[in-house]
């Protein structure tokens, strides 16, 4: 045996089982469609080196969305002699889950069934006779609680011995058979409403739900800002000022002012001092932007996002905003990629795979890369415009929201194709495990450091070299007129537009030494968000949408950025 | 037999049939939606049955969002949100508890 496939309906805990088996950390959340691409890991059982694949959730072996197509493809590519399928089942929804189980049994693969969320069956008054179920299906059945690790040991022991089921399914009515199996193995007890269930009712209620969502979103925003600012003011800035600054001063003395190396590593001295926002050296601004200005917000954002994901609030929000989202031609579940995009556009674009049609994916991905600034960029906008308070920050986000609606509306009018309606499962509320939650935050913060830090340093280095060799001057003389005339921003800001392709946070940071007014900062922040995605987002856009759709998307971005910038210039 | 849209809330409903694509759509107040860009009519019956919505199953309508928003139903232990056009194709009959 060489391969193990984790198959199951969406949101049954496959990713959590995957992490338990392989030790590879992957993101698991409480909404259908967390995993849209398959992930590989390895595990060892009795000297067998086994490849484990976390397959995107699917309701049947007939694919209805790109994520389900991935699942089907993996199955077709696997060799039944070398592969075992572990079918993860949500034991609180046994009947529906068995549909896929029976379909899997009719393939020639050895199958093993996991009854996950075993702990929840107790609270919900569901009793399942696992031995009987195992006899009827003619495969091993193991109850598990993926998040605590219950049952994983038993699973490991049974994997090796798994054999294809001898159940004869040809020509049988599957649902009829499932009904019989359920009657023989499951009985339900009456149980009372629990607190999460009351909350569930409130949060999808047409009126109370909207009030509740307003409360949740406002609270999330306040907490993100509070934790982010708190971390910056009380931990990261003091660390840089008190510990790192003396080191920098020594290096600065050693290198000597006005030398080439000084310009690259320390940057310009502002009034004889090193300024972390304005100096723009590799060791000063290059480290300060990612570690002290952006990282705290990344931590606080992902902490809150993980809570929203793991409790199961996002699909409920999707139902509430379904009407709004249809205005831009996508259904309510489109809110999930939008939320992820606030952290980073890359996972946002990938998550558009939960949408069923090409039209929806093109609209969602374009609208997102135009109008949703990632958390790194948002943190820098806060850093620069924060001193003006609400007056400085609100216009940026309000304009971007308007752009989101307008571009979406226009695209939904002209992009051809279908926009299906929402059709999604709403998972029950679950109380997140703090340990699991913190691990997830850590995983995402780790990605940010690994992916972003090198790019920020490269960005800052390029800025320095551009200045040193006078390239910025050259370009700003060439194209600067455009900026000044249309957008009302000084010609030097053109360099920010160039660097913005690499990292948007560095680009916003480049505005700091230019001494712009509030209005100019607002215009520049909006234009920098809109005009083009950063290189990382561009690559996934290209992969997801293909050449023509990416080109369309890019044209829309650039032209709308100039237009909106022009309007803002007229206002301010 | 009535459509799920017309059915009462919070009473057990038995699914009688799932209307085939497009039939009987003319009399549904869906205002624009679904006309130009369809309601995602591919493979409805299969997608419904994958989620456990099929003939003979007891479901409950929990809530219906205003302005042609989605309908939320309960199937077994699971809540499902369904757009109006799709929901309208589900024909149900009230049953006594």
Image (cartoon, coloured by chain):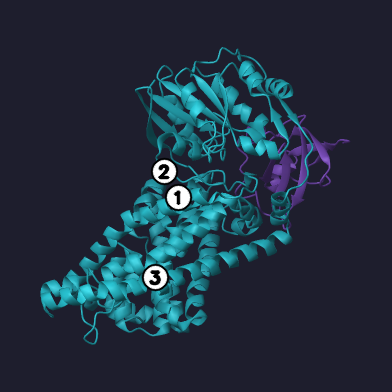
* Whether marks 2 and 3 lie on the same chain: yes
Residue carrying label 2 = A25
Toward the viewer: B10 or A245?
A245
Tell which circle, 3 or 1, labels the residue nearer the N-terminal end.
3
Residue carrying label 3 = A235
* Chain that bears disc 1: A
Hue used for the chain lettered A: cyan
Q: Secondary structure at mark 1?
A: helix
Q: Residue at x 66, y 56 (%)?
A: A320
2 and 1 marks in contact (CB < 8 Å)? yes
* Whether marks 2 and 1 lie on the same chain: yes
* Chain that bears disc 3: A
Question: Image check: A285 left or right of B63?
Answer: left
Categorize mark 2 by other alpha carbons within 10 Å: few (<14), some (14-19), many (20+).
some
Hue used for the chain lettered B: purple
Could you tell me if residue A498 is visible in this image? no
* Whether marks 3 and 1 lie on the same chain: yes
Q: Which disc number belongs to residue A439? A: 1
Categorize mark 1 by other alpha carbons within 10 Å: few (<14), some (14-19), many (20+).
some
């Amino acid at each position: 045996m060489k391969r193990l496939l984790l198959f199951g309906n969406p949101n049954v805990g496959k990713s959590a089982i995957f992490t338990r088996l392989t030790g590879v950390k992957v993101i698991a959340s409480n909404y259908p469609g967390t995993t849209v691409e398959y992930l590989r890991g390895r595990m060892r059982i009795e000297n067998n080196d086994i490849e484990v694949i976390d397959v995107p959730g699917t309701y049947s072996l007939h694919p209805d969305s790109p994520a389900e197509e991935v699942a089907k493809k993996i199955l077709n590519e696997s060799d039944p002699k070398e592969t075992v399928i572990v079918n993860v089942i949500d034991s609180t929804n046994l009947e529906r889950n068995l549909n896929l189980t029976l379909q899997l049994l009719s393939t020639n693969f050895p199958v093993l069934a996991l009854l996950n969320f075993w702990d929840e069956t107790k609270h919900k008054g569901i009793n399942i006779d696992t031995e009987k179920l195992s006899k009827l299906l003619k495969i091993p059945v193991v109850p598990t609680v993926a998040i605590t690790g219950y049952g994983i040991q038993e699973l490991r022991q049974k994997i090796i011995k798994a054999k294809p089921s001898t159940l004869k399914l040809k020509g049988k009515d599957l649902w009829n058979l499932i009904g019989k199996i359920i009657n023989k193995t499951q009985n339900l007890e009456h149980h009372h409403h629990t607190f999460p269930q009351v909350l569930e009712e409130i949060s999808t209620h047409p009126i109370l739900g909207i009030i509740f969502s307003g409360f949740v979103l406002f609270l999330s925003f306040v907490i993100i800002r509070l934790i982010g600012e708190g971390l910056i003011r009380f931990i990261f800035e003091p660390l840089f000022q008190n510990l790192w600054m003396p080191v920098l001063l020594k290096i600065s003395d050693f290198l000597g002012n006005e030398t080439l190396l000084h310009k690259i590593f320390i940057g310009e001295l502002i009034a004889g001092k090193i300024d972390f926002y304005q100096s723009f050296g590799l060791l000063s601004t290059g480290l300060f932007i990612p570690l002290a200005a952006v990282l705290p917000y990344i931590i606080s954002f992902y902490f809150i996002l993980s809570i929203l994901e793991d409790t199961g609030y996002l699909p409920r929000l999707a139902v509430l905003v379904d009407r709004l989202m249809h205005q831009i031609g996508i259904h309510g579940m489109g809110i999930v990629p939008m939320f992820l995009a606030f952290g980073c556009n890359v996972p946002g674009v990938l998550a558009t795979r939960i949408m069923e049609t090409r039209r929806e994916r093109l609209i969602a991905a374009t609208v997102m890369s135009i109008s949703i600034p990632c958390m790194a960029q948002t943190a820098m906008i806060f850093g620069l415009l924060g001193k003006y308070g609400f007056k400085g920050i609100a216009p940026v986000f309000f304009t971007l929201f308007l752009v989101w609606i307008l571009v979406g509306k226009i695209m939904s009018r002209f992009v051809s194709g279908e926009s299906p309606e929402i059709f999604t499962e709403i998972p029950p509320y679950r109380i997140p495990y703090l340990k699991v939650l913190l691990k997830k935050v850590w995983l995402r913060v780790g990605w940010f450091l690994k992916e972003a830090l090198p790019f920020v340093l490269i960005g800052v280095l390029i800025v320095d070299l551009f200045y040193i060799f006078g390239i910025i001057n050259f370009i700003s003389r060439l194209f600067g007129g455009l900026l000044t005339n249309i957008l009302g921003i000084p010609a030097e800001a053109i360099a920010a537009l160039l660097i913005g392709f690499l990292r948007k946070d560095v680009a916003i940071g480049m505005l700091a030494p230019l001494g712009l007014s509030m209005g100019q900062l607002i215009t520049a922040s909006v234009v920098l968000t809109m005009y083009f995605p950063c290189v990382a987002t561009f690559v996934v856009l290209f992969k997801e949408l293909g050449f023509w759709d990416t080109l369309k998307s890019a044209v829309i971005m650039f032209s709308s950025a100039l237009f909106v910038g022009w309007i803002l210039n007229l206002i301010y | 037999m009535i459509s799920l849209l017309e059915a009462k809330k919070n009473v057990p409903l038995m699914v009688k049939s799932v209307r085939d694509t497009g039939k009987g759509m003319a009399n549904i107040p869906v205002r624009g939606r679904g006309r130009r860009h369809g309601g995602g009519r591919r493979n409805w019956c299969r997608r419904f049955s994958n989620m456990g919505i099929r003939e003979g199953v007891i479901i409950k309508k929990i809530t219906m969002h205003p302005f042609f928003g989605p309908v939320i139903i309960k199937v077994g232990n699971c809540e499902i949100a369904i757009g109006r056009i799709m929901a309208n194709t589900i024909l149900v009959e009230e049953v006594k508890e």
